[in-house]
Amino acid sequence: MAPHPTQPPPKSEAPALDRGLAILELLDGAPGGLILTEISDAIASPKNSTSRLIQTLIDRDYLQRDEATLRLSLTGKLLRLGQPRTREVSLVECALEPMRALRDRLGETVQLGIPIGDEGVIIEKLESTRAVRIGVNIGLRFPFHNNAPGKVLLAYQEPQERARTIARIPLERSTARTIASAPQLLQECERVQQQGFATDFAEADEGIHCVAAPVRDRLHGVVGTIWVSGIAGRMPEASFNAVAHEVIQAATAIERKLQS
């Protein structure tokens, strides 16, 4: 299905820049990608000029084209530009070594995420060393209510902001264990703050468990979250506390680098 046309942009001194940004925003809401005609129609721009803008964005590594389907999609460049930094060091640069150590200790998939609006987004991943592993993509967005990293990002918001967020986001049920009510989610946020980590007992996907911890910057604000995802049989609920100890240790190592 073709995307709906966007509203005409306000008058601008840089109309080409407006159209370029409109392309990025449009593709942000189309994880499966779009073809040139769909993009041109959606932003109400001629195909020739849209094609030139798209080529520039490809050349600068903001977009990628599937040569088989000709569908265009975002690369991870915007995530790399937007991630938290301390001086010249990015969050991912600070996190890679602790993430590798955590992955090697536990053998499970390790991921790093940051908040963007009312969602989290994965900015780095290291896959499990096991034969059967959980596949995830950098750039994947996740809600705040039905998984461990989302709960961390929600729990450490300021209380008034957290209440507004919970009132705003859809509490859709993914499995029978998903928290789908605001009072329960607020209670879960309090538990996350008290224990310093969050868990996901197959609340987003059947058979998948997660344990996440916050990552803080130099001002002790939570700028991201690190978590481990594992198949339930390999990472049962009884192991959550032990896994959390390892995840918190990795988060602390990232913070030391980020805060130095």
Image: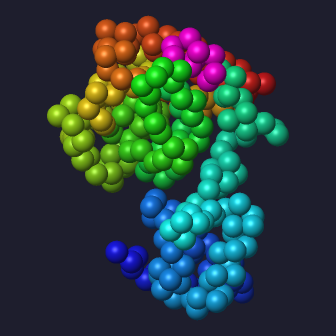
Picture coordinates of residue 154 (x, y %)? 42, 38
Residue 160 magenta-highlighted:
no
- Magenta residues span 99-107
Residue at x 51%, y 13% (from the top left corner): 106
Residue 105 magenta-highlighted:
yes
Picture coordinates of residue 152 (x, y %)? 44, 31
Residue at x 66%, y 87% (from the top left corner): 49
Residue at x 43%, y 31% (from the top left corner): 134
Picture coordinates of residue 113 (x, y %)? 54, 38
Asked if residue 5 is positioned above or below residue 146 in the image, the reply reads below
* Residue 127 is at least partly visible in this image: yes
* Residue 214 is at least partly visible in this image: no
Q: Which of 178 and 223 is in front in this view?
A: 178
| Colouring mode (rainbow / by chain / secondary structure / one colour) | rainbow
Residue at x 55%, y 44% (from the top left corner): 138
Q: Is residue 188 left or right of residue 86?
A: left
Q: Quadrant of residue 178?
A: top left
